[in-house]
Image (cartoon, rainbow, N blue to C red):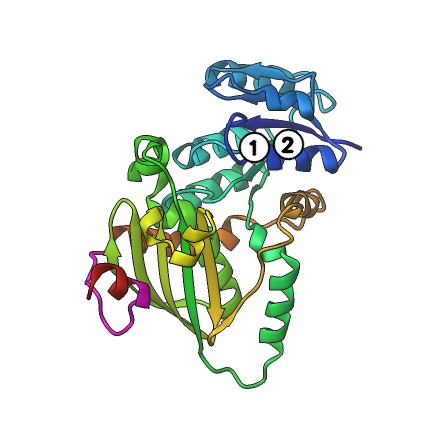
Amino acid sequence: MSKNFAITGVAGYVAPRHLKAIKETGNQLIAAVDPNDSVGILDSYFKQVRFFTEFERFDRHLEMLRRKGDERRAHYISICSPNYLHDAHARLALRIGADAICEKPVVINPWNIDALQEMENEYGQHVYTVLQLRVHPSLLELKKKLDSETKKTKKDIRLTYITSRGLWYLVSWKGQQERSGGLATNIGVHFYDMLIWLFGKVQHSEVHVASETRTGGYIELENARVQWFLSIDENDLPNDIKNKGQATFRSITLDGQEIEFSGGFTDLHTIIYREVLAGRGFGLEDARPSIELVHSIRTASPIGINANAHPILSKILGG
């Protein structure tokens, strides 16, 4: 039997992936909310959707549907709103007897996970999160290979992610640390989750550089040493990438060899939704290690460049 979905943040960048996943898994979207009314995208997926620009009216509508029985109520709320609202929107889902499917990061602070777990127990519902790299075919193959190794030696990992953004970024909620969690949280959390999933628990973390537009550091995991660098400054792009007119450079190397997973992204949200609907989705405890890590990165005092630093930092900063 198909399920009823509602969605928050439907005018945002990531919402179309959720709309596609809801449709491709054979379910209905019955309500949507966003303070921005540029939501014509809805017509490409579901036309008969009650749309709200005020969260209070959306809340009231879902509560009314809950009282009309199982066929009318929302069974799931997909959360695509700004990061700082994820916690509140997940709480709404639990209160109306729905499960939440929440974009990364599921919350900004680790203690929000504890509070949501208490509410899960209280209402008998679940908060799932979108950790889509864990279902990427190439990365599943890599994990299988790593898990089969009898001799565990620490791998050397280098994560570089430069995705140039215009001046709007720092003005928007994404550029406000209290709303997005900062650069490492907003654009890095799914990479950190992937690395912890592949290479084990965090043993040590240090931050070398941190600004509004770039940050870099070092993480020691059970089975890997990770140099990482994240940037939204187009000046940090390698020259060959700039010359091609490309705005993004992403590279993750394992012992000097590129981990190739640039393809196969189009259906990952649909796979996540299928897993959630089958009761196998990624929950709050799955997300906890990466949320704890990005919180420690956000609150750390940068120590400057040292032997553990990503090579690009020395190049950029002239260290």
Q: Is residue 241 left or right of residue 65?
A: left
* Residue 15 marker: 1
> Cβ–Cβ below 8 Å for labels 1 and 2?
yes
Residue 306 within the segment the image draws in magenta: yes
Span of residues in magenta: 300-312
Look at 62% across and 15% down and name the residue there: 50
Find disc 2 in the rendering and name its residue. 19
Identify whether 9 is placed above or below 251. Answer: above
* Residue 175 marker: none
SS class, disc 2: helix
Quarter of the image holding residue 313? bottom left
Label 2 Cα neighbours within 10 Å, binned few <14 / some 14-19 / many ≥20:
many
Q: Is any part of residue 289 visible from this angle? A: no
Disc 2 residue type?
A: Leu
* Quadrant in which the C terminus is drawn: bottom left
- Where residue 84 sits: x, y (%)? 38, 35
* Quadrant in which the N terminus is drawn: top right
- Where residue 24 sits: x, y (%)? 73, 37
Q: Decide which of 67, 1 is in the foreground and name it.
A: 1
Disc 1 residue type?
A: Ala
Q: Residue furthest bottom?
A: 151
Label 1 Cα neighbours within 10 Å, binned few <14 / some 14-19 / many ≥20:
many
